[in-house]
Image (tube, rainbow, N blue to C red):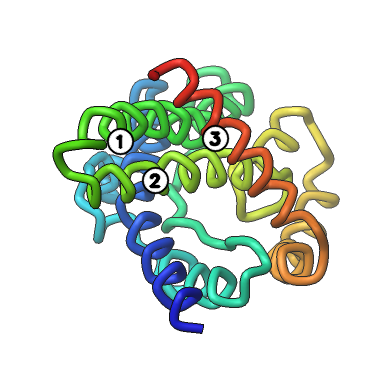
Amino acid sequence: MQFELQRALLDVLLLWVLTAPHEFAHAWVATRLGDDTPRRDGRVTLYPLAHVDWLGTAILPFVTSLLGGGFLGWGKPVRTDTSKLKGGLNGLALVALAGPFSNVILAVLMGVVAVLSLHSVPALAGFAREGVRLSLYLAIFNLIPVPPLDGSKLLLAARVPMAIYVELARFGFMFLIVAISLSDLGRWMSEWSYLGERAIFGMLQ
């Protein structure tokens, strides 16, 4: 139990480290596409507290990680105005993909840190290695096409009727909790992130 508790706390800490760049990427791309909403909301920043959703960035990730059934977590969503985005719904898709893409970049950067600090600062290397795995996990998790995750915006870009999207959003949160807790979805995503981790270190070493 002590090991699971330490692992859960480490996962939440890493999530805080990874959330700010993820949400910043959404805000930055939206701003580049002409939407000033994220800037007015103070989201074009790497300051972590600007992007924290206490339920999604602390409570749920701690509980799901502690239970060992996968990992469920997210940051505070970045508001966008589709009418201001260049490309409309296609621009919204780019904003949505920016978050998971930033996680892949972060995974590579943390892999570099892990390799460089392996002999000089082993504790940092271990932390960074866990960051590689979790960052890839978050990239995969956020691509699930269920609100409130980034992948759900791809449904809108694919012109899924708004009525269907709204219905999906009503049960999306509960669906994610059930899927992570009671199915093999969390295990599959962990395995995929582990394979990605091996590929990154295979390139760096």
- Nearest-to-viewer mark from 2 and 1: 1
Residue behind mark 3: 96
Instruction: Measuring from the top left, give residue 190's x and y in whole percent.
Output: 64, 49
Residue behind mark 1: 114
Q: Please, what is the three-letter code of the amino acid marked with disc 2? A: Gly
Q: Secondary structure at mark 2?
A: helix
Between marks 2 and 1, how big is the CA–CA gap? 9 Å
Instruction: Measuring from the top left, give residue 41's x and y in whole percent.
Output: 29, 50
Of mark 2 and mark 3, the one earlier in the sequence is 3
Q: Quadrant of residue 193?
A: top right
Q: Residue furthest left?
A: 120
From the viewer's side, name the closer residue of 99 and 129: 129
Residue at the image position 26 percent from the left and 39 percent from the top = 44
Residue at the image position 51 percent from the left and 68 percent from the top = 61
Q: Residue furthest bottom?
A: 1
Residue at the image position 60 percent from the left and 45 percent from the top = 142
On residue 131, the disc is 2
> Is the residue 13 above or below the residue 154 in the image?
below
Tag 2 and tag 1, C-beta contact below 8 Å:
yes
Instruction: Measuring from the top left, give residue 111's x and y in whole percent.
Output: 36, 31
Q: Please, what is the three-letter code of the amino acid marked with disc 3? A: Ala
